[in-house]
Image: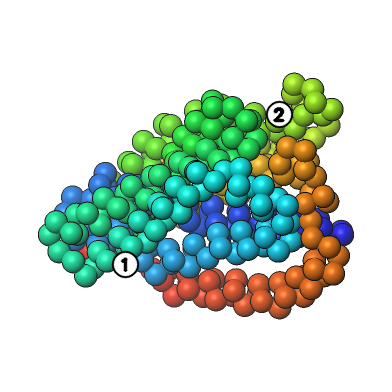
Amino acid sequence: MDVTTFWFLVVAFLWTGYFVLEGFDFGVGALLPLVTRDEAERRQALATIGPVWDGNEVWLITAVGAMFAAFPAWYSGFLSGFYLPLVMVLAGLIVRGVALEWRGKVEGRERALCDAGIVTGSVLTAFLWGGIFGHMLSGTLAGTLVGGALSLSLAMLHGGVFLALKTAGPLRARARRAALTAAAVAVPAAALALPGVPASIRPDGAAGADWTAHPLVWAAAVAAMVALAAGVALIWRRREGWAFTATAGSITLLTATVFAVLWQAPLPGLTVAGAASGPYTLGLLTWIGLIALPFVLAYQAWTYWVFRKRVTA
C-alpha cells in the first residue's frame, strides 16, 4: 500500500468515526422534545451524551485537518464548492454546542431557548451532512434531498437506540418507540439511496456503472442495508446493545461505500493522486499519525468505558 492510499483510508476512517459517534449525538438532540416529558427526563437524556459530545466533534476537526494536510486540492475544492452548506453546518454546531454548555447555567425561558438550540442544531447539521455527500455523489437536487433525509432519519434511529441503551424507565420505552418511528423513514430512504451510491461510479462518462466492475462497493451497500434492517429488528426485540452495534455498523458500511466511490474521483475532474500532497509531507504525516492517533483512540475508548452505565433520572 502506497502512502497516498494509506492517507485516503485514514481520512475515510476519521469521517466514519465522526458519523458513527456524532450520529447518536445528533439523534439524541433531534429526539429531545419527542421522548422527554419534563425537566428531569430532559436532563436524563442529555446526560447520556454530556461526557462525550464535544470529544465526538474532535473527529470532524481531525478529519478536515487530515484532508488539509494530505489532500490540499480535495480540501480546498470541498470547502469552496460547498461553502454555504458548510457554513450552515458550522452555525448548527456552534448553536448546539453553546446550548449544551449554557443549559445547566440558566433557567426558565433561557433554558427553553437552549433546548430549541440543541434540537435545531442537531436536525440541521445531520440533514446537511447527508445532503452534502448526496450532492457530491449525484450532483442532483433529488440526491441531495434523499441524502439529507437518510442522514437525519438514520441519526434519529441511531440516537433513539443509544437512548434506549443508556437510560431506564419511561424514557427508555419512549426512546425505543422513537427509534422504530425513525426507522419507518430511514429504511425506505436507505433502499432508495444505497443503490445509487455505487451506481454513481461512472466508467468513461457512461450514465451508470456496471456492478460487476465494482463488486465490493455493491457488497458494502447491500451489507449496510442488511445491518440497518438488523438494527430495526433488534430494537423491536429490545436488544438495545446489539441494535446499537447494528446501526453503528450500518453507518460504517454506508460511509465506506461513499468513500469507495470517492476513491475513483473525490471531486469532478480530480483524482486522489492529483489531490495528494508530496511524498515528503505524506511521509512526515504518517509518522505523526502513527505516534499520536493510538493515544487519541485509547483516551476516547477509556472515556466511553468510564461512562458506560445507564443514566437514571
Task: Say which residue appears at 63% left-offset and 63% top-offset.
Answer: 65
Task: Say which residue appears at 75% left-offset and 21% top-offset.
Answer: 207
Between 296 and 99, the one nearer to me in the picture: 99
**Picture quadrant where residue 10 is located:** bottom right
The answer to whether residue 21 is above or below residue 218 is below
Quadrant of the frame with the C terminus: bottom left
Quadrant of the frame with the N terminus: bottom right
Between 308 and 289, the one nearer to me in the picture: 289
Please say whether residue 53 is visible from this viewpoint: yes
Residue lying furthest left in this view? 108
Q: Percent from the top left, x then y, of residue 300?
A: 53, 71
Neighbour tally class for label 2: few under 14, some 14-19, many 20 plus, Cα within 10 Å: many
Q: Percent from the top left, x then y, of residue 292?
A: 66, 76
From the image, state whether disc 2 or disc 1 is nearer to you: 1
For mark 1, what is the residue? 101
The answer to whether residue 309 is above or below residue 83 is below
Lateral position of residue 50 relative to residue 300, left or right: left
Q: Give the spatial CA distance, label 2 vs label 1.
A: 42 Å
For mark 2, what is the residue? 199
- Which amino acid, by three-letter code, is at mark 1? Glu
Q: For numbered disc 1, what is the local secondary structure?
A: helix
Task: Say which residue appears at 27% left-offset and 61% top-offset.
Answer: 44
